[in-house]
Structures are given as structure tokens and as C-alpha cells.
Image (tube, grey):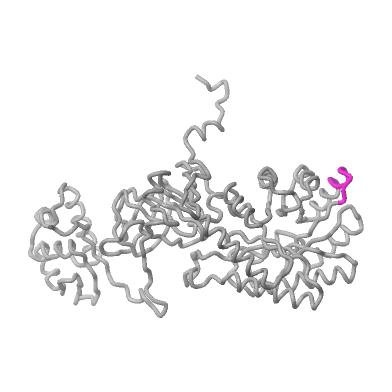
Amino acid sequence: MSPRYERPVIVRHALGGADKFGAANAVRPMRDFEGVSIAELVAAHGSPLFLFSERLLRQRVRELRSQLSRRFDDFVVAWSYKTNYLGAICEVMHQEGSWAEVVSGMELEKALGAGVPGARILFNGPAKSAGDLEVAFRTGVHVHVDHLDELEFAERVAERLGLRPQVGLRVHIGDLPVQQWDRFGFTLDNGSADQAVRRLLRRGVLELTALHCHIGTFVLDPAAYRHEARALARFLRRLEREHGVRIDSLDLGGGFASHNTLHQQYLPGEELTPSLGQYVEQLADGLDEGLEGAPPPRIVLETGRAMVDDAAILVATVLANKRLADGRRGVVLDAGVNILPTAWWYRHDVFPAQEPRGLAEPTVFFGPLCMNIDVVREALMFAPLEAGERVVIGHVGAYNVTQWMQFITLRPNVVLVSERGEHAVIRRAETVATLLQQEEVPPWLRR
Amino acid sequence: MSSDSSRLRQLAVSESGFVFDPLTGHTFTVNAAGLAVLAGLKAGLDVDAIAVGLGASFEVEGGEDVRRDVDDFVLRLREHGLVK
């Protein structure tokens, strides 16, 4: 019997390809997802295909709760809707005891519509309309005020409704080892936060019961949370001392990293990303330092990416191979950056969905868009792939199915796989009819 | 192809596909099909003949695809400075 044919390939050896951390790339196949064959899942639901693991979602949120329970008696984990607000994903999170953290009227409507009680919803963000605030106050949602104009809107709405809602203030803390996010909240260091508190207390329309801070995203240094928690706890103590205000809830935001690898990162996320326990330890130590023995308030965490990113994969099919001008192999996939915007932030893991055969060579994965920017993954040593074969892109659960675009191609099915291997579509693939139902042709253009 | 074949004859090629270029010091790996194409080029065969031989050795149907692959491989050799 003749040997199996593989295209002739020559790969130049690059010195430095391996270092003290091991081989530069080790691509292993991924044929199953949660015990179900990927081929079977694609046959049932098409390609490209987002697959979420219910088991991994639950496992991750349980792990966070377990870590928090080691240091806190009273804590809340809130599900960050913007990270992934598909109804089924939110339902899993709520079944695991998570509140909802929303940042727009749309997200608020979605959470209330899903049956989440207002008392278990946190409302953040810099753009709450008077209508949003009215809904929030009527339903007992916890509103975190972002700026002075919003404080004034909130007071007007509360007065109109004849209510005295409990609210929190979002605070920005400078001097943290992360990129500054000073566009959100009242800055603590320059007195803006104190000014807002004085105004709120003077008017007496709202009741200040919570403080909130969110220091950034994909924060790889857990010590940043120690600084944040300490500063926020000290502010809480000072408000008690100077104004007699009792703060019963500290929302420390989110921003924990997933196991993805940022483009600028040297070590892979699997090695570099801190554990949930490391984040929680730093945060708890910072609180202890700031509270100086005072009883801790309720602690709220709303970290989204670290809960969901690692629980999902994207399956894509190879459409074609081509040789680039610089000699690298280009592989065209049926999934592009329009459905995987996180490819702009991460060097996503890519695995073959079948046993790799043949010599690995430098490979670039492109999407199907007629756009130069449609690069799913640069520079990966990968075995030959034939048209029709499949690859799996890892760690895609956060932000993709909320930030994706309908652009050039249609958005595909999203499927949840249960712990028992059941699988069901949780967001249907778009068709041209989906697009057309949103469009109108004015009467004077109709034929 | 004569100057190419003399350049290629300088290469040290092992049976397992390890290639050493004494002119530059660069090393390469080729797969089995690449090894067969290199052997053909070193022997002075043209691309058509190599593609036919490759197709026969691996029992591949559709000679056009093999011819395309051999063309692509020769391009890669050129980029690495192994043929002109």
C-alpha cells in the first residue's frame, strides 16, 4: 500500500524556537468537546460553530464562590451581562447564585425580563437615562452613580417617584499598577468623590449605601486588587467617621484575566494567568488593611471574563490553503474576526479537530472576509490542513457573542453542551431573512 | 535546471528529511514528498516529470493538484535560496 500523500513541504529551522520554557508551540488535536464528537456537533449545527460547556461555566463560578467563602461571610457574585448576555448563559450563572450586573437599559430590561428580581441587579455604566433610572428605582435595582450629572438625574427621578432609593457611588482610584480608567466614576485622589458624597448627603434625596470601583480589564497583577480594596475600605471608614454614613456594600468590580494570551504577552496565558484564589487573597488582604478591624461590609465581585472565556470554543472549517509572499502558509477559515473580535486582543489557541499529519510549518489563519484585517491567528506552527478539515479556536466565551458583527457573512449558531452531553442551540444562526426583516425600502424606491 | 541541480547537489539530505545547506549553514526539514521532489531536482528532472513520479509513488489521482504542489515547493526552495 502506498504511503498517504502529503504536499511537499520544507521548513527552515529557526534557532531560538525553543527556550527554557520549552517548545515554542505544541499543537494537540481536539476531537471532542465535553465528550461529544466535534464532527457530530458540526453535522448537527453547522460551521462555524460556537460551543459552550455548561460544566465549565458552573465549575468556574463555583470555584470563585468557594474562594470568596474562605475569606468572607457575606459576599455576592454578580454576572457581568456585557461579557455574554445570551439567555442560556445568564440562566446558568443565575442558577449558580449570581446576581446580574448590567450597564445599559437594554441589559436591565433583559435581566428583569429573565425574572431576576431588582434587588439582585446591579446597574453600572456611564449612560443611564431618566427612563432607565425610573425602572431601576421602581424595581429596587442597586444603582451605582457614575458622575455628577447622573447624580442630579437620579435625584430628580427619585423625587418625581416619591422614593428615597439606596444608591452607590462609583469611585476611580489613581495610583494603581494598571492602566488608568479615569473616565468612570468619581476620582478619589482629587476630592471629586468627597464632593459627590457631600452633595448627595446635602440633598438627602438618595441614600448612600454602597461604593463601587472597577480597576480595569484582563488585570494580570493580583496585587492591583489589594491596592484597590485597601483604598476603597479606607474611604468607607472615612465616610463613616466624617459623615456618619454607613456603607453596607463594597463592589470591587471585576477584570480578572482568563487563560487567553494577549498579543503583547510573552508567556502563554495558561502559565501566566493568576488563579482565582490569588486574586481573592490579595483583595481580602487589602480589605483587612483598609478596614483596620472594622466589620467588613458585603463584598460584591462582578468579574465576567474569568468566568466564561475558558468555557467556550469556536469550531471553524478550512476553506482553502494558500502560500503567502513571504513563504508562510495561509489557511482560509469560514470564521473571521467579524464573529471573533477577540482575535484583535489575543493570540488564540488553535487546535486541529483531527489527528495532525505531516510536517508542521509556520501558518497564518485568516477568516473569510475580503478585508486585510481578517486575521484569526498569526504565526503558529501547524501541520497541513486540507479543505474541509476543521480547527478549534480556544477561550472564546467572553465578549465574542456580544461584540460580534453581522458583516459580510452571517453569524452562526451558538450551542450549549450539557454535563450529560446534550446539546442545543442557544442562539440561532442568522439568515438573509434575519437581515431583511430589519430593513425598509422607502416607497419612492420600490419597484 | 543544471545550475539548480548543481546547487542542490551541494545540500546534505538525510533519509529522514533533514537538510543541511553548507553554503549558508541553514538547516531544514522536508517531508516524504518534499524529499522525493528534492531527489528529482537533484537528478535534473523537470517539474512535470517530478509531479508524474510523485503522483505515481503516492497513488494520487488528479495530476494537476500534484503539479501545483510541486510548483509551490519549488517556489519555497527559491525563497530559501536553494534554487535560482
Kindly report the secondary structure that dominates the magenta region of the rendered protein: helix
x 20%, y 51%: residue: B68
Spot occupied by residue A124 in the image (x, y as percentages of width and height): 71, 54
Displayed quadrant of residue A211 = bottom right
Residue nearest the observer in this picture, A174 or A205: A205
Please indicate whether residue A118 sits to the left or right of residue A319 in the image: right
Q: Is residue A224 magenta?
A: no
Displayed quadrant of residue A357 = bottom left
Q: Over which residues does the magenta segment extend?
A: A156-164
Q: Which quadrant holds the N terminus of chain A?
A: bottom left
Q: Is residue A161 magenta?
A: yes
Please indicate whether residue A293 sits to the left or right of residue B42 in the image: right
Spot occupied by residue B54 in the image (x, y as percentages of width and height): 13, 57
Instruction: Check the image and report above or below for A416 versus A260.
Output: above
Furthest residue toward top = A447
Q: How many marks?
A: 0
Instruction: Check the image and report above or below for A249 versus A149.
Output: below
Spot occupied by residue A215 in the image (x, y as percentages of width and height): 67, 65
Displayed quadrant of residue A178 = bottom right
Residue nearest the observer in this picture, A120 or A191: A120
x 73%, y 49%: residue: A117
Residue A236 can be seen, yes or no = yes
Furthest residue toward front = A420
x 35%, y 53%: residue: A390
Instruction: Check the image and report above or below for A140 versus B74.
Output: above
Residue nearest the observer in this picture, A133 or A417: A417
Please indicate whether residue A378 sits to the left or right of residue B14 in the image: right
x 47%, y 41%: residue: A410
Residue B84 can be seen, yes or no = no
